[in-house]
Image: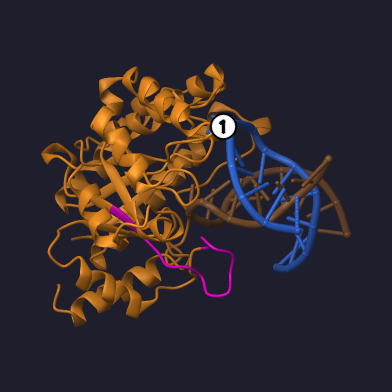
Chain colours: A orange, B blue, C brown
Amino acid sequence: MRIGYPCINNSIDGTSNGTFRLKSYSQERLIEVVEKNLEALMAIIQFNIEHDLLFFRIGSSIIPFASHPVCDLDWSKHFARKLTNIGDFIKKHNIRISMHPDQFVVINSLSADIVQRSVAELEYQCKFLNSLGLEADAKLQIHVGGMYGDKQASIARFIENYKSLSENLKKRLVIENDDRLYSVQDCLYIHEATNIPIIFDNLHFDCLNNHENMLDAFKLTASTWKENDGIPMIDYSTQEPDARVGNHTKTIDEQHFANFLKLTKDFDFDIMLEIKDKELSALKAREVMKSLNLL
DNA sequence: AGTTGTCAAGCTAGT
DNA sequence: ACTAGCTTGACAACT
């Protein structure tokens, strides 16, 4: 079981999410920003190893504009050595990696254009993980997409469009239950038709479910991960008190986390903490695990 | 140095 | 009709 956090580390200097405005695009600018992003990514991985945080989500803008027509750089070639070095470092320390294409990636969209751009974005992120030399256990997690007033038709469209994706992409793509539209049950239905693994998100489950027991839902999603996929990943968070439903908490609720671990103790999986204070909560989470003798 | 409007991209629900 | 929220700030122009 590995503990991780998404995209941002506030303890190190620099960021791996640097970008710039489309208006100011130039190949030189892109190279300059990617250079810094990769340097920061290496520093984050280093920090994570030192603190035994062995799961990390890389931000979508690690290569800004990579799926935009304006991008005229063969970045995987240009940065080949650096990417290989980072990937080797990741593999050497058995670090799990994921990426989470953002809300603009909708592969069940009614617009063929949006689907096409979504696939281009997925292909870029997939290529990034490939360029690091990571195996199929490094995943790209997305939501099912929009509902457009007809859930059955939208699920059918997801399944259809999924089938036409490259094998390369299918190897990495996983879906996550969301908090308003597509529940674990909906994801399981899609899994039946596609074999796509499901990331369980406990907070989303609390927001949207089919009145099934949480542990049962968790078990069902865990069983969708096959040998090649690695052990299941989950997203873990809790509701921010007194905030709108679905808001992620600012810092980890250690009692809730301890209870969650006790409940799921018979399973091996990697936990992504979707919590606003990032690595700080990840470090607290490790302390909780220690106190439960899980480390 | 600090503040603020804006940034490639979609969709839904709440106001 | 508009906007917050989503995994989440960062850029760039202004004071």
Image coords of residue A33 (percent x, y): 51, 41
Give the magenta part as a residue range: A234-247
Q: How many marks?
A: 1
* The image quarter in which residue B8 lies: top right
Q: Is residue A39 above or below residue A12?
A: above
Residue bearing the label numbered 1: A148
Quadrant in which the C terminus of chain A is drawn = bottom left
Magenta stretch: includes residue A287: no
Image coords of residue A78 (percent x, y): 38, 27
Dot 1 amino acid type: Tyr
Give me the residue at 20% from left, 56% from top.
A269
Q: Is residue A264 above or below residue B7?
A: below
Q: Residue furthest front?
A: A211
Label 1 chain ID: A
Give me the residue at 29% from left, 43% from top.
A198
Q: Is residue A228 left or right of residue A277?
A: left
Residue A38 or residue A177, whichever sits in front: A177
